[in-house]
Amino acid sequence: MADLIDTVAVVTGAARGQGRSHAVALAAEGADIIAIDRCADIDSIPYPLATKEDLDETVRLVEAQGRRIVPVVADVRDLAALQAGVQSGVDTLGDIDIVVANAGVVAIGLKDPLDEQLYRDIVETNLNGVWHTIAATVPSIIRKGRGGSIILTSSAQGLVGRGGDGSAAMFAYAAAKHGVVGLMRSAANAYAQHSIRVNTVHPSGVATPMILNENTIRMIQEQPNAAALSANLMPVPLVESEDVTNAVIFLASPKGRYITGVALPVDAGHAVM
């Protein structure tokens, strides 16, 4: 039986990869979707980001589950644009029950220790963008008045510093993903009175276009500490989007109704000390 009938879920970074997987699985469980993505590249990020055509495919896949979806082209770094996009979804689908703040970028292999623009772009997307997503959605959950679940995508790099190389890219990524845990814990305290649960998921490398692209694969191969970055205890180099999605669905569903403030690794043992 679908656990999320008559709910509305917001997913950022929904055009492809983990975000698309989460959106489609939430729809399969009965949720209508507000699917948000930038749908454009960022100059400092060394691989192609999702496109409008990618977001259109997410729309098709969600509709194939028999659910409604409102696609929103917005950059999570822009709070006003994100608020407007969320409101357009709420106007169509109703108030929100579930939020998956998934949008993120990485720049493995860019070694400049003083690349301020890259540092800002990563932190503004991976940390500020998560805060913006919370800020843009929580008022709707509170207004609806029946509680909710917020799942923030961090990383195994939000739990460990393995693979640090002194670059602006890696410092920004690790700092932002650790910061997401702080946001989660603070939000779990702030919104518990409204029966809103807040948790993080922490994947190690995931087999998505963020990793499986020519630039990132080449950079990983050239990295002297690449083995540290992909050091899963279990004998798999990457986990799959569906593995992270399974955790997201559990945390979003009534099965996780009393789970809040938890940092949940989905990492094949990467973060085990």
Image (cartoon, rainbow, N blue to C red):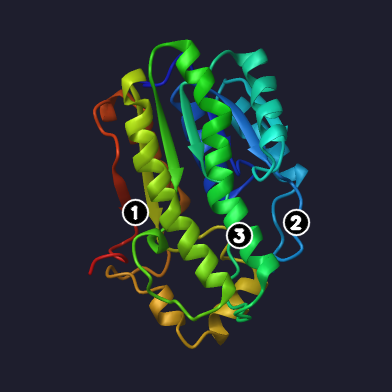
232 vs 94: above or below: below
As shown in the figure, which amino acid type bears the numbered disc 1? Val
Of label 2 and label 1, which has the lower sequence position? 2
Question: Which residue sits at x=59%, y=45%?
Answer: 129
Q: Quadrant of residue 270?
A: bottom left
Q: Is residue 32 left or right of residue 236?
A: right
- Camera-near label (2 vs 1) is 2
Question: Which residue sits at x=57%, y=21%?
Answer: 67
Q: Residues within 10 Å of mark 1 (few under 14, many from 20)?
A: many
Label placed on residue 40? none
As shown in the figure, which amino acid type bears the numbered disc 3? Ile
As shown in the figure, which amino acid type bears the numbered disc 2? Asp
Distance CA(mark 2)–CA(mark 1)? 27 Å
Pick the quarter of the image with the N terminus.
top left
* Closest to the observer, 81 or 107: 81
Of label 3 and label 1, which has the lower sequence position? 3
Across and down, in percent, residue 94 comes to 58, 13
Across and down, in percent, residue 54 comes to 70, 45
Name the residue tied to disc 1: 266
* Closest to the observer, 247 or 59: 247
Labels 3 and 1 touching (C-beta < 8 A): no
- Camera-near label (3 vs 1) is 3
Name the residue tied to disc 3: 122
Q: Residues within 10 Å of mark 2 (few under 14, many from 20)?
A: few
- Camera-near label (3 vs 2) is 3
Name the residue tied to disc 2: 41
Q: Secondary structure at mark 3?
A: helix
Q: Is residue 153 visible?
A: yes
Across and down, in percent, residue 253 comes to 35, 27
